[in-house]
Image: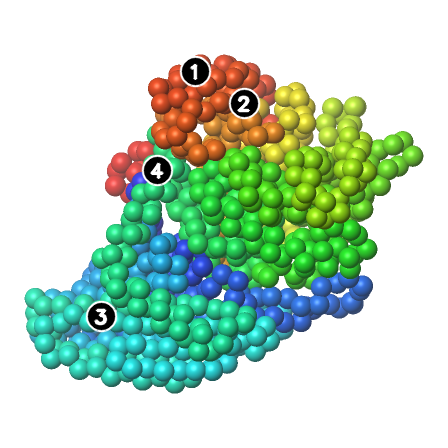
Amino acid sequence: MTEHGYECSPWELRWRGLDVDALQRTESAFAVSNGHIGLRGTLEEGEPRGLPGTYLNGFYEQHELPYAEGGYGYPEEGQTVVNVTDGKIIRLLVEDEPLDMRYGIATAHDRVLDFRKGTLRRVTEWSSPTGRRVRVTTERLVSFTQRAVAAIRYEVEPLDEDLQLVVQSDLLANEPIESDTRDPRVAAALDAPLVGQFCHATGYQGVLVHQTRMSGLRIAAAMDHKIEVDNGLRTRIHAEEDLARLTAAVDVPKGGRLRLTKFLAYGWSAQRSVPALRAQVEAALAGARQTGWKGLAAEQQQFLDDFWATSDIELEGDPELQQAVRFALFHLLQAGARGETRAIAGKGLTGPGYDGHAFWDTETFVLPVLTYTMPDAARDALVWRHSTMDKARDRATQLGLRGAAFPWRSINGAECSAYWPAGTAAFHVSADIADAVVRYVNATEDTLFERTCGAELLLETARLWASLGHFDHHGHFRIDGVTGPDEYSAVADNNIYTNLMARRNLLAAADVCERHPDVAAQFEVDTAEIDSWRAAADAMALPYDQELGVHPQSEGFLQHDEWDFAGTDDDFYPLLLNYPYFDLYRKQVVKQADLVLALHLCGDSFSPEEKARDFAYYEARTVRDSSLSAGTQAVIAAEVGHLQLAYDYLAEAALTDLHDVHNNVRNGLHMASLAGAWQGAVAGFGGLRDHGGQLSFAPRLPDELGSITFRLTFRGTRFQVSIQHDTATYRVLDGPSLDLVHHGERYTVTTEPLELPIPELDPGPAPTQPIGRAPTRRDASKLRRFVSAGNP
């Protein structure tokens, strides 16, 4: 087959045809997950494949970190996500010929990720090298309702004649993978990382238990089957250290079918014994068998019906962007729905990129989406951060500081970045976590969480800032020698983003300790300490250049030499792969939104005029070598009135993975960029802000879109915002009335639609970007004509 590619559809992602070279990236896009289990979208027969992957949230192997020269305070051990026991494999032999898409002829091959059903479907019509034709129909899911369970429905139909069919259903551990890591320590850690401890098979059921060599984590994987045929079934099952296999042979007449339902269960623990883990997965299997495939599918669809009722975004006028935004929301749900006190990694559970680590991206980009759409998932992610508090305290102590210093990148909560300007100096991570705590509590009024987890997170991060910063002889509170969000700057003084977020952190900690004096007393916070936090916040150093009328990203940044964009060839991006960091650090070149991110998250600290000037200045210096940037630039471009530019950036963020903009989707999807699609639509064109717990909107619509409608939840109220070019309409869908601000005016929203005018805004001249780094100009009218003509 020669025709292939994603087709445009509002509620699904379909790839028609087989492109072996594209498997690695389609396997990421077609991954199914529930936040606990992640299955990459590999073909059931296992080959051809791009990169196999089955992941359990929080399950990792550890290894030594590489240092040419060691130093005090350097983390000693890294952590890498493990490809665990693969239960997706179902091989088919047609009259002794294995179904392999590289041989014979595939007259049809269709794969569909359904955003409403929560399943990955496949239909393949295949003719073997000797001309036997079969139709294979599969559907797989990872259950949102039964956390430990995945399931696959597998059907084979002979198309022309009676056929003998043999199916082999496997559990396979230590699947051979060619690692593309340049670190031999990581490659060694991932070479057969699982040591077999137990294997058992009987009837249609198999169980394997393994333990990692270094981290000592133990995993159990189990499978069970339901087989439906007319007659003549013969089966055999066996198990060995790294393999459990059920083989089923049957003669199927033309017009008949072989249907196999495979139930999978996974569990892992750092403490539980082999018998305990075996019992856990066997119990999960029993529950799955009792529910059955139809029951699991029905539960999956009901779960998603509830999710879309709270979170859907509808865009009129750009079908491809509509699909991309729902794709983004679906994968964000998959990353966080059932994480339940585990981290949300930068790639979710879609691939091994970033070694499976969680970053500050989670709190700053992903959790706002979950806070206003699925707040329980946001709470669980913050509970995970709280569970790592001891490691954060230890890290602060190691660095000679008080409080808690949370890691730049981690799986279990310990810092495992070997690059010290990020792993040690990027302290803004702690303020990002505090910001997510405040946002969640404001949006949910979850006092129990605030008392049991939130207050401690806030007060211990405040202690970090109080010990990290100092008062200079002018009375300013300075935070020197830190790395902000922009990774082309490092170890700078008074990074504006860091200082503003630290100020918010300090004030929030003071407030929570005054609201809950008993909790404050538990952690020995007295009035003097609270007063010191407020004093530091009030005196926070925030540099400003009066001559240029802009804020420096960090102190001294505006005195750096300009980068020679005109002399930089397009092939030399991303810059970090072609220039030394030494050169990047001393020039005015920005990898990703830093000061501009402060304009969004701490927008109440800037005037509208300052935002416009700052945005224009940093637009001309930001190269977007990071997938984190476009979503934030979309938000501020919309706020200052550059709506076409905001639209272009929104599309870039939403389509980063579907278009493989950064050429690395093979290693997994970019969760923060997917969240940037929501940010661009809701915080950008919707103008959502939540400063101080006050929900406000300043909607504006680009000419390219006919309307945007989105749904959110806030303090128990589910509501909808519909934006047209001249008006915006607010309506409560469920729950009590809601007080909000629309373009600076306060209103009460009820179940009766409230239509309000959108004031005009003169944005002034459009900002410019570095040569060759402007976002792709998006023309929705051309795209609409292209799609309506039947093109994918």
Quadrant where the N terminus lies?
bottom left
- The residues tagged by marks 1 and 4 sit, at their Cα atoms, a distance apart of 23 Å
Q: Nearer the viewer, residue 367 or 253?
A: 367
Between circles 4 and 2, the one closer to the viewer is 4
**Which of the two discs, 3 and 4, labels the residue nearer the N terminus?**
3
Identify the mark at residue 641; answer none if there is no mark: 2
Residue under pointer 1: 756
- The residues tagged by marks 1 and 2 sit, at their Cα atoms, a distance apart of 19 Å
How would you rate the neighbour count of disc 3 (Cα within 10 Å): few for under 14, some for 14-19, many for 20 or more? some
Figure quadrant of residue 480: top right
Q: Residue at x 33, y 72 (%)?
A: 223
- The residues tagged by marks 4 and 2 sit, at their Cα atoms, a distance apart of 30 Å
**Which of the two discs, 1 and 2, labels the residue nearer the N terminus?**
2
- The residues tagged by marks 1 and 3 sit, at their Cα atoms, a distance apart of 57 Å
**Which of the two discs, 1 and 3, labels the residue nearer the N terminus?**
3
Between circles 1 and 3, the one closer to the viewer is 3
From where the camera sits, is residue 739 visible? yes
Residue under pointer 4: 309
Identify the mark at residue 58; answer none if there is no mark: none
Q: Nearer the viewer, residue 772 or 630?
A: 630
Q: Amino acid at mark 4?
A: Ala
